[in-house]
């Protein structure tokens, strides 16, 4: 089994760098996720303790001082850092401009979801997972959908 300091790439593409003991993450280590972001933590037999999660855009999660998207302040992180866009120009996602969603699909945050195949692919069209019934219903209910007809803001003459 793995022991000492090293790196390990999981089948998902995530990579762990840090201390290992008896084949488990143990001690100081960092788990970098494939689509960005990751955990810096003190691991105890594979379980993260004293952890800090950083999102791909640099936003750090803090359980005690978390004010992002808390019900009182609904701004995206990029809006917090760079300010609002002019009135009448919406910002639909944290990424601006947002990814163009393939026809018939939904943007579910980590990629695109096709409800006909029930498959989630990343933004480069690489397979991520099959959606179960709960995720399928949640995506249909809450996520942005590609529209057949684009609607643009047209100024009044």
Image: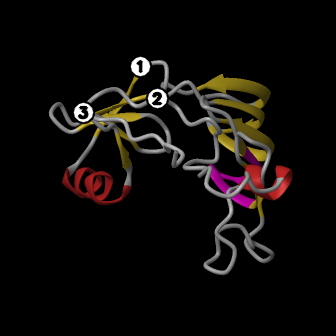
Tell me if mark 1 has few (under 14), some (14-19) or many (20+) residues whose alpha carbon lies within 10 angstroms of its own.
Answer: few
Q: Is residue 151 left or right of residue 54?
A: left
Residue 61 place in picture, x, y as percent: 74, 60
Q: Nearer the viewer, mark 2 or mark 1?
A: 2
Q: Which residue is labeled 2 in the image?
A: 100
Q: Which mark is residue 59?
A: none
Residue 114, picture quadrant: top left
Q: Residue at position x 19%, y 53% from top?
A: 133
Q: Which residue is labeled 1 in the image?
A: 125
**Which quadrant holds the N terminus?**
top right
Query: Dot 3 lies on which element?
Result: loop
Q: Residue 42: in sight, yes or no?
A: no
Q: Residue at position x 63%, y 35% from top?
A: 33
132 versus 127 height, above or below:
below
Magenta segment? 39-49
Tell me if mark 2 has few (under 14), some (14-19) or many (20+) residues whose alpha carbon lies within 10 angstroms of its own.
Answer: few
The numbered mark, 2 or 1, whose residue comes first in the sequence reads 2
Residue 51 place in picture, x, y as percent: 76, 58
Residues under labels 3 and 1: Cα distance? Answer: 15 Å
Marks 2 and 3 close (CB-CB < 8 Å): no
Q: Residue at position x 49%, y 39% from top?
A: 110
Residues under labels 2 and 1: Cα distance? Answer: 12 Å
* Closer-to-camera residue (51/89): 89
Q: Nearer the viewer, mark 3 or mark 1?
A: 3
Residues under labels 2 and 3: Cα distance? Answer: 12 Å
């Amino acid at each position: 089994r793995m022991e000492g300091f090293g790196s390990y790439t999981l089948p998902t593409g995530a990579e762990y760098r840090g201390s290992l003991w008896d084949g488990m993450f143990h001690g100081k280590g960092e788990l970098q996720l494939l689509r960005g972001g990751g955990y810096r933590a003190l691991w105890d037999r594979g379980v993260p303790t004293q952890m800090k999660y950083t999102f791909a855009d640099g936003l750090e999660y803090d359980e005690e001082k978390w004010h992002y998207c808390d019900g009182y302040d609904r701004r995206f992180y990029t809006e917090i850092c760079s300010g609002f866009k002019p009135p009448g120009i919406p910002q639909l996602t944290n990424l601006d401009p947002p990814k163009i969603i393939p026809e018939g699909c939904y943007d579910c945050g980590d990629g695109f979801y096709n409800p006909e195949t029930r498959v989630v692919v990343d933004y480069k069209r690489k397979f991520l997972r099959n959606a179960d019934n709960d995720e399928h219903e949640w995506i249909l209910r809450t996520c942005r959908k590609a529209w057949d007809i684009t609607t643009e803001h047209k100024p009044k003459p």
